[in-house]
Amino acid sequence: MKVINLGARHSVLNTYMSELRDVDYQRNRTLFRRNLARIGQVMAYELSRTLDYSEHPVTTPLGTKPTALIDDRIVVGTVLRAGLAFHEGFMQVFDKADSAFVAAYREEGSVEDMKIHLEYMAAPRLTGSTLLLCDPMLATGGSLELAYKAFLRAGEPAKVHLCVVLAAPEGIEALQKVFPGDDVTLWTADIDDHLNERAYIVPGLGDAGDLCFGEKL
Ligand code: PRP
Ligand code: URA
């Protein structure tokens, strides 16, 4: 698995990330979701540079312009709940893409013993598609791994991009084992220090799903 950390170079992403992390800004749920969507937009744009293109004639009122357009059949596959706002950012950029959804939530647990529940999956045919698997937080990696395996029931994608906002080294290491080759890319907007005993990313930003939508029971 290749890792592309967009946070390694300074950009406006730093502003969005700092607001996501900041406990004062976090009181504004609308802004929290909006920043996840904005990071999704930036990531989608960066990722678009790596897709396949072929030229098509576009007819203007005055002539014809050969234009390179995306060949990939993109499916934005999102892990609920926290993935919803991030998903919106990707869909604003790839507005013709199909969507796939899977719901996953972590039970309280430790890094070594985290139980993840997968409850719902809906996807179009994924065979031959370019799957962008989106979930803002990569902590232990368990949710992304289970989500990917659930999506395989809808067919094998030709290309897979894993898209997260914030990654922990432990989660990256876990996913390297699931995707040992160089054909899968992990995109992240930042990489933090470590996981704490409850498998939260430190310094991180807290519970992304709760910050988007309120505390779950
Ligand atoms: C968060 C996040 C990921 C998961 C990451 O979801 O959105 O899905 O944690 O952790 P992992 O890498 O250890 O699997 P959460 O379980 O908090 O559910 P929620 O989005 O419904 O709040
Ligand atoms: N999920 C979150 O929302 N935050 C973390 O730090 C880890 C998993």
Image (cartoon, rainbow, N blue to C red):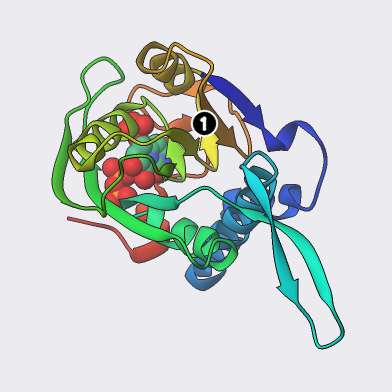
Q: Residue at x 75, y 31 (%)?
A: 8
- For the view shown, which residue lies furthest in the bottom direction? 61
Q: Is residue 144 visible?
A: yes
Give the number of marks.
1
- For the view shown, which residue lies furthest in the right direction? 62
Within the image, what quadrant is residue 59 found in?
A: bottom right
Report helix, strand or loop for mark 1: strand
Q: Residue 148 appears at what percent x and percent y?
A: 30, 34
Q: Residue 186 appears at what percent x and percent y?
A: 53, 30
Query: In this rendering, is residue 172 above or below 147?
Result: above
Tag 1 residue: 167
Query: In this rendering, is residue 131 above or below 143?
Result: below
Within the image, what quadrant is residue 19 found in?
A: bottom right
Q: Residue 163 appears at what percent x and percent y?
A: 50, 40
Q: Residue at x 59, y 61 (%)?
A: 35
Side of 6 relative to 160 (left or right):
right
